[in-house]
Structures are given as C-alpha cells and as structure tokens.
Amino acid sequence: MIENERTIRKDLVIQAARQMMTSARTAPKGKGADVIEIAIATDDDIERLSAEMLKIAEEKELKFFLRDADNIRQADALLLIGTRFLTQGLNCAHCGYVSCAAKPEAVPCAINAIDVGIAIGSACSRAADLRVDTRVMFSAGLAAQRLKILGDDVKCVMAVPVSATSKNPFFDRKPKEPAK
C-alpha cells in the first residue's frame, strides 16, 4: 500500500495535536493541582470560533481579530488550553493582592495563569519536535472562552492553531480591514 502525505496530512496534524494535548497535561502544575482543561477543535468548530472572533472584532474594534479569524481557518486543528480558577492559598501576592483572601473571586490566582503558560510551552515544544506549524493566539482563545468550549468555569483560554504546509500560515500575516 502507498500512502501519499497529501491525502493523510490532516489526520497527521490531528495526531500531532493529540500528542500536544498529552504534553500540556503532563506539564508541571503549581502545588500539583491540575486545573488545566484541554481540547482540540476541528472543522465546524474552527468555523464557529472564527465567527465568534469576527463578533469580538466588531464589538471591541480590534482589527487583529479579523486577521486571526481568517488565519485559524487555515489550521487543521486548534488546540485549546485554559484553567479553572483554584486559589492556591500561598498568600504570595503574585496576583497583585496582599493575600488570597483579599483577591476578588473574578481575578485568577497567578499560579493558575502560569500553569496555562507552562502547558502551552510544553505543547508547543512537542509541536516543534513533530515539525508542525503553530502560533499561540490569545484571540482564538478568547473566542473559545466566550463560547464556553472548555466549560462554564474555564478562563485564561489560549489557542494554538496547528498546520503542516510548506509555509507556516500563522506568520507573515497581512492585517485585515473591517468590511464596509
């Protein structure tokens, strides 16, 4: 049997994204508390995220959401990583408040946000090992958070589109203007 890479590329990218999920899951977590949520979006869910990004672009007047909404459509998979809020009780003041008790409930524990960053770094390191193209996107993560794709209580969501083409589609991107 002969398999042409062009015919199985999407499956290979999705397999790579699944390995990235494992790397994110096994990344170190503050105080050993695993509050990270991870998922992969493909096909119609990428389109749904793109549509939400267009809404955000209009609401917030942020042009880069227009560019990114178009850009994620070039991905075969979109890795989503976020955190549930769990105050770690360290009273470290890293969040900007003097103690965990003084921190408003809507403000994430800094350790939770750091855990998301470490998980993203681990996932992107795996992507580099597999030689797939990625880019970390706050914009697509915010759309996923608004759509509650990872759950009602998951915040600080970041997205990592994944592709395997001869040129990384997530770099050297052109700005887009709103439709008139």
Image (tube, rainbow, N blue to C red):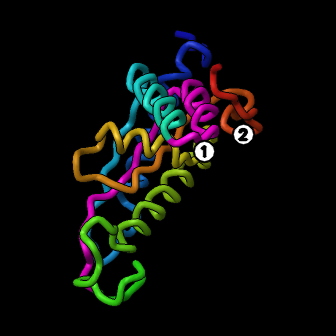
- Residue at 48% of width from left, 62% of height from top? 117
Q: Earlier in the sequence, mark 2 or mark 1?
A: 1
In the rendered structure, are the residues bearing label 2 and label 1 in contact, judged by CB atoms less than 8 Å apart? yes
Q: Residue 62 in the image: state x and y as whole percent.
A: 59, 42
SS of the residue under disc 2:
loop
Q: Nearer the viewer, residue 88 or 67?
A: 67
Asked if residue 16 can be seen in this view, the reply is no
Side (left or right) of 1 relative to 18: right
> How many marks overall?
2
Magenta residue check for 85: yes
Name the amino acid, label 2.
Phe
Residue type, label 1: Arg
Check disc 1 and report its element: helix, strand or loop. loop
Q: Note whether 10 is above or below 78 in the view shown.
A: above
The residue at the point 41 percent across, 66 percent down is: 113
Q: How far separated are the C-alphas under marks 2 and 1?
A: 8 Å
Disc assigned to residue 171 = 2
Q: Is residue 99 above or below residue 57?
A: below
Q: Which residue is at a point 35% across and 41% down the rendered structure image?
A: 146
Q: Is residue 47 left or right of residue 57?
A: left
Q: Residues within 10 Å of mark 1 (few under 14, many from 20)?
A: some
Pick out the residue farthest to the front.
Answer: 180
The residues colored magenta run 60-89
Residue 59 colored in magenta in the image: no
Instruction: Point out residue 147 in the picture as x, y percentages from the top left corner.
Output: 32, 37
Residue 114: image x %, image y %?
Answer: 44, 69
Q: Which residue is mark 1?
A: 135
Quarter of the picture containing the C terminus is top right
Which disc number belongs to residue 118? none
Q: At 72% across and 39% down in the image, what residue appears?
A: 171
Is 83 drawn above or below residue 4 in the view shown? below
